Amino acid sequence: MDTGSAGPQHSEGLRLLEAAQWAAARDVFQATLEEEETPEALDGVGLALFFLGSVEDGIAARERAFDAYADAGRCDEAGRVGVWVSHQYLLSGRSSAARGWLARAERAVAGAECDGQGWVAIERARHAEDLEERTAHTRRAMDIARNAGDSDLEVYALSLLGLTEVNAGRLDSGMQLLEEAMAAASAGRVRNVHTLAEAYCNLIMATTNAGDWDRAGEWCDLVDEFAREHGTIPLLGACRTIHAEVLVARGRWPEAETALESALETHSRFVPEMGAPTVAGMAELRVHQGRLAEAEQLLAGREEHPSSLCALAHLRIADGHPRVASALLERALGGAGGDAVRTTQLLAPLVDSRLACSDTQGAAVAAGQLADLAEASGLRLVAARAELAAAHVHLASGHVPEAAEPARLALAAYARLGMPLHVGEARLALARALVASAPEAARDEARAALDAFRELGAARAMDAAAGVLRELGQATGARPRSQGELTAREAEVLELVASGMSNAQIAETLVISQKTAGHHVSRILSKLGVRNRTEAAARAAHREKTGSR
């Protein structure tokens, strides 16, 4: 927003915004509006309301600020505010409104040389379907920022360009740009908290996409702390969703579930439309756990949302409809737009879905594309996906001995990345490859895979590992049905139910919402196959007596 307007009230409001004192800033700007409706006051109160969680009111106030800035011919402010409004609509899935507001912002800065041109270029980059187009727009924004000395614009452009480079498979250059952006931000060159928050999000998305889980986890913790400290509530949902992806990859599923539930609760309170990636993340976790009915329920009505396509495909593979999964993945690939990371995320399950359709040739083509991307990008995560896909294709094609080497390479790569589910999958592929030549080694690998899957609670993968062990003449031991397995959090809630606590008391004890506590209790009753809390308490007593999970 404008920083050059005179007046002590306006200056105080700006100071409070920069200090993330949202309620105080709102009060100052609202007092100004009672005297005179200025664009600066509308702009300031809109941003304060947004961060206080009154998202729709905040957007509405900034829409009015844009009109006032545009009418006054104030290119910088009109461009920046118009782009902000456009991006909020883009995030909430209202793409038509987002395009309309971007067009309005472009019209407001047309023919003028101002910083607003740079912010319009940023939004053009975020709307771009092709990574090269995104790069071109972002570089233009950087040039404008440096010429104008706009630190906010420069830092955000650097972070977006870094994310784009990583997604294109250019890891070294991408991380260098992101680190430059964060160094500038840490030096206090960014005045707008919203800009800083989005730059942080670009960083953790890039590290997650690259499979750099240690760095991603570290930055997720820092961003979560930043969001709490600055009261940037809408940021919490987005960041916790990304953090949950890290936790799932690292095998910390109960923590991931808690993060996803928290993110869903945040989205439902503020901007429900922004929750689609969180829902997709929860659905994928449910598929891993073998809780397919819950995954189906989560994804109902979201079939066309881009973030849901991959989760739906995993679900369709799991429930025996691989042709539908292939169609979903092929559609999603059509919109990947040169994004190497996104492409590999889709090609890996496409190999599996095509193999499930007995389309070995099609699976081999997809696996070859993965191998090409791995070589071009140099990303360890992409290489691991490519090796495991190659192993699966060899096994399905009857070239069993040839599957051993890529399976070993995938196992080593996933182990270095610290991804236990995929380590187990690679072990299972290796076990299948060794059945004829080294049956004892095959049994060892399959048993290790089963143990890893059991520890995770990966029900579907446990069934696959048990099947391989049975083929090798090994008993796997009885295990509870997947719907009877409780997460660590659910086991904790069950103990509180058994002690006679209500949902409200459970919520207070665990520092969660009463709604979340109710969801936990409902799932526990369903998993244990009991009708009420009394029966659940009896089951808890039995579990404690027998030492069962």
Image (spheres, grey):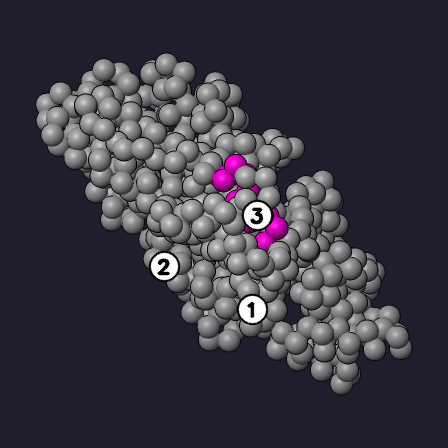
* Cα–Cα span, label 1 and label 3: 38 Å
Label 2 with label 1: CB-CB less than 8 Å: no
User: Tag 3's secondary structure?
Assistant: helix
* CA neighbours of label 2 inside 10 A, class few (<14), some (14 to 19), many (20+): few
| For discs 2 and 1, the disc positioned in front in the rendered view | 1
Residue 141 left/right relative to 72: left
- Compare marks 2 and 3 and give the one earlier in the sequence: 2
Q: Which residues are magenta?
A: 517-529
Label 1 with label 3: CB-CB less than 8 Å: no
- Of residues 226 and 438, the one nearer the viewer is 438
Residue 184 left/right relative to 368: right
Judging by the rendered image, the residue that carries numbered circle 3 is: 534
Residue 102 left/right relative to 538: right
Amino acid identity at mark 3? Thr
- Compare marks 2 and 1 and give the one earlier in the sequence: 2
Q: Tag count in the figure? A: 3
Residue beneath the point at 68% across and 55% down: 269
Residue beneath the point at 57% across and 57% down: 500
Amino acid identity at mark 1? Arg
- Of residues 271 and 1, the one nearer the viewer is 271
Judging by the rendered image, the residue that carries numbered circle 1 is: 228
* Cα–Cα span, label 2 and label 3: 45 Å
Is 520 one of the magenta-colored residues? yes
Q: Dominant secondary structure of the magenta stretch?
A: helix
Judging by the rendered image, the residue that carries numbered circle 2 is: 215
User: Tag 1's secondary structure?
Assistant: helix
- Compare marks 1 and 3 and give the one earlier in the sequence: 1
Give the percent coordinates (x, y) of residue 478. Answer: 31, 33
